[in-house]
Image (cartoon, grey):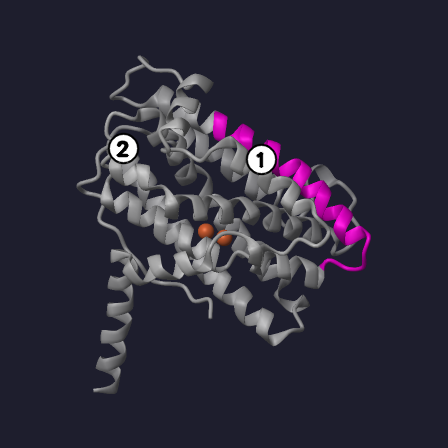
Amino acid sequence: MIVPRRVSFDWRRTPLHWIPDEPTATHVINVLHLLLPAGERWFVRVFKEALPLVTDPRLLKDVKGFMGQEATHSVQHSYVLDHLAAQELDTEAYTRQVDYLFERLLGERPPWGIPFPAGRWLLYRLAFVAAIEQFTAVLGDWILRAEALDRAGADATMLDLLRWHGAEEVEHRAVAFDLYQHCGGPEPLRYIRRVGTMAVTAPMLLWLWIRGATYLIGHDPQLAGRLRYTPLAHDRAVRKGLLPPWRGLAAAIPRYLRRSYHPSREGSLGMAVAYLASSPAARAAAGAVGRAALGKEG
Ligand SMILES: [Fe+2]
Ligand SMILES: [Fe+2]
C-alpha cells in the first residue's frame, strides 16, 4: 500500500554546506529543493486531472497514495528553501522560473495556444511525469546506497529527508508509468509519446540542474563568488561517491525506452522499505499516527 508519511524535519542545526567542505556536491543535490516544490505540486495537479480516467480501483488507490506522497515531498523540500533563505541564500529568482515552467508551460492548457485535440495534452503531461519518475527512482535508489555521504559527515537531518524521499520514490516508482499506460490510448501512439517525452525530459532536467547548481554556487554568501560550478568539480564529487555517476543516470534512458520496460524493475524495493522502517522522520510520523489512533480508541 502506497501511503504518505506525515514527516517533519528540524532544520535549525543544518549548516549551509551540509556536506562539510563540499560546496559543489552540496549545491548539486540542493537543486532538488529548487525543482521539487513546484515539480511535485504539478505532479499532483496533473494526476488530479487524470483521476476521472482511472477505471481500475487498485490503480486508483495507488494514484491517490502517490499524490499524497508527492504533496508531502513538495512541502518538505519547500521548507529547505526557507532554511536556505534564512542563511542568506535567496532562491526566489530561480524558483520563479521553475514555477513558470510547471504552472504555465506545462499547465492545464497547452502553452502558446498550441491546438492539441481535447484530452491529448493531459496524456503528454502524464507521459512527462512517468519520464521524470524514471529519474526520481534511479536517484532515490542511489541516495539509499550513497554511503560516501555518511563517511563525508553529511548532515543527518538532510540525509534523512533525502533518503525518506528517495525510498518513497522507489516505493511508488511504477505508479506514474502504470497511470500513463492505463490512460495513454492505443499503441503505437502511446509508445511514441513515451519516447518523445523522454527525449525532452532528459536534456531539460540536465539543463535545469546545471543552471540550478550554477545559481546556488553563485549566490552562496559563504562562497562569495570564490567558486564556480564546473564539470571538473562535479566529476571530482562523483568520484568521491558524493554525487550519482553520469553513466548510471544515462543508462536509465535506454532502459526506459525499451518496449518491454516496467519500472518495477528499477531500484530495490527491499532497501527502500528497510530505510523507511529505520528513518528517524518516518518512524516519528508512524509513532504520531499510532498515538493518534490510540487516543481515538481511548
Ligand atoms: Fe517525490
Ligand atoms: Fe515520485
The answer to whether the residue bearing label 1 lies less than 8 angstroms from the nearest atom of ligand 2 is no
The residue located at (30%, 60%) in the rendering is 282
Give the x, y percent position of residue 198.
Answer: 66, 41
SS assignment for the magenta stretch, majority: helix
Q: How many marks?
A: 2
Give the x, y percent position of residue 185.
Answer: 77, 59
Q: Earlier in the sequence, mark 1 or mark 2?
A: 2
Element under label 1? helix
- The answer to whether 150 is drawn above or below residue 57 in the figure is above
Left or right of 83: which side holds 100? right
User: Which residues fall within the magenta stretch?
Assistant: 184-210
- The answer to whether 16 is drawn above or below residue 70 in the figure is above
Give the x, y percent position of residue 17.
Answer: 26, 30
Identify the residue under disc 1: 250
Does the magenta segment cover residue 191?
A: yes
Could you tell me which quadrant the C terminus lies in? bottom left
The residue located at (48%, 25%) in the rendering is 211
Query: What amino acid is labelled 2 in the image?
Result: Ile
Q: Quick one: label 1, few (<14), some, or many (20+) residues within 10 Å?
A: few
Q: Residue furthest left?
A: 13
The residue located at (76%, 40%) in the rendering is 114
The image quarter in which residue 36 lies: top left
Identify the residue under disc 2: 19
Nearer the observer, 95 or 26: 26
Does the magenta segment cover residue 177?
A: no
Give the x, y percent position of residue 184.
Answer: 73, 58
Query: What amino acid is labelled 1 in the image?
Result: Ala
Q: Can see residue 37?
A: no
